[in-house]
Image (cartoon, helix red, strand yellow):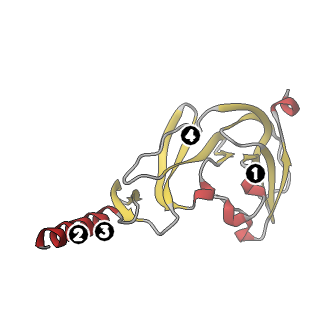
Amino acid sequence: MKRVLIFISFFVFLKAYFAVELRCYECNSSGCDYTSACAEGEVCLTIFSKVGNTVKVADKICGKKEHCGQSFSQLVRGQKETNFTSCCESHRCIPSEKNAFRNGIMCPFCTKEGSMECTPTNYECMGKANVCYTYTAPGRIIRGCGSKELCGDPMNSFITFEDDGGRTNCTEKSTEDSG
């Protein structure tokens, strides 16, 4: 009987030990080397930033599964910058840069502060970005491409603009539209 109780106690200990919450790498001012416990239902989410041919990690967080696989591009200081997300769901996993591919969809890009008009240049979108967007706020316009979530429910998008009173208008695109 004593052996059975020891075995059961050991089994309960193992189950409790391996049933811990998901731990993901997160970034702080010192880097992205520490881990944090995620809330139930969250995944390890990495936001990558691509300018030219250089891809860098912009942030690592515990995030919503709905934010995985999204892409958003705009012009920053005259250069196309693409931010995209990648996720994984295992303890201390490292998401890949798999969303850094060109997808054949072309959208007009431009950014202008102090004006409601800008002269766009067409750029190719990346990853799952399939909408061309125009964001306007008083004295500001931004055009680029993003994932469909950018134009839908802001709670399902990893990036939103509307906190400064502006509006986002979107046009869904396909590679046939861009030819």
On the image, which quarter does residue 19 sit in?
Answer: bottom left
Amino acid at dot 1 = Lys
**x, y percent for residue 52:** 58, 33
- Please say if the residues under marks 4 and 3 sit with CB atoms less than 8 Å apart: no
Mark 4–mark 3 distance (CA, rounded to whole Å): 41 Å
**x, y percent for residue 36:** 37, 64
- Please say if the residues under marks 3 and 2 sit with CB atoms less than 8 Å apart: no
- Residue 37, placed above or below residue 148: below
Residue 148 is marked as 1
Judged left or right of residue 147, residue 3 is left
- Dot 1: what SS? helix
Mark 3–mark 2 distance (CA, rounded to whole Å): 12 Å
Question: Which residue carries the number 3 mark?
Answer: 16
Which mark is nearer the camera, 3 or 2?
A: 2
- Dot 3: what SS? helix
Callout 2 environment at 10 Å: few (<14), some (14 to 19), or many (20+)? few
Mark 1–mark 3 distance (CA, rounded to whole Å): 40 Å
Q: Residue at x 53, y 46 (%)?
A: 48
Amino acid at dot 2 = Ile
Which mark is nearer the camera, 4 or 3?
A: 3
Mark 1–mark 4 distance (CA, rounded to whole Å): 19 Å
Question: Which residue carries the number 4 mark?
Answer: 50
Which mark is nearer the camera, 4 or 2?
A: 2
Say whether disc 1 or disc 3 marks the residue closer to the N-terminus: 3
- Dot 4: what SS? strand
Callout 3 environment at 10 Å: few (<14), some (14 to 19), or many (20+)? few
Q: Furthest residue to the top?
A: 179
Say whether disc 2 or disc 1 marks the residue closer to the N-terminus: 2
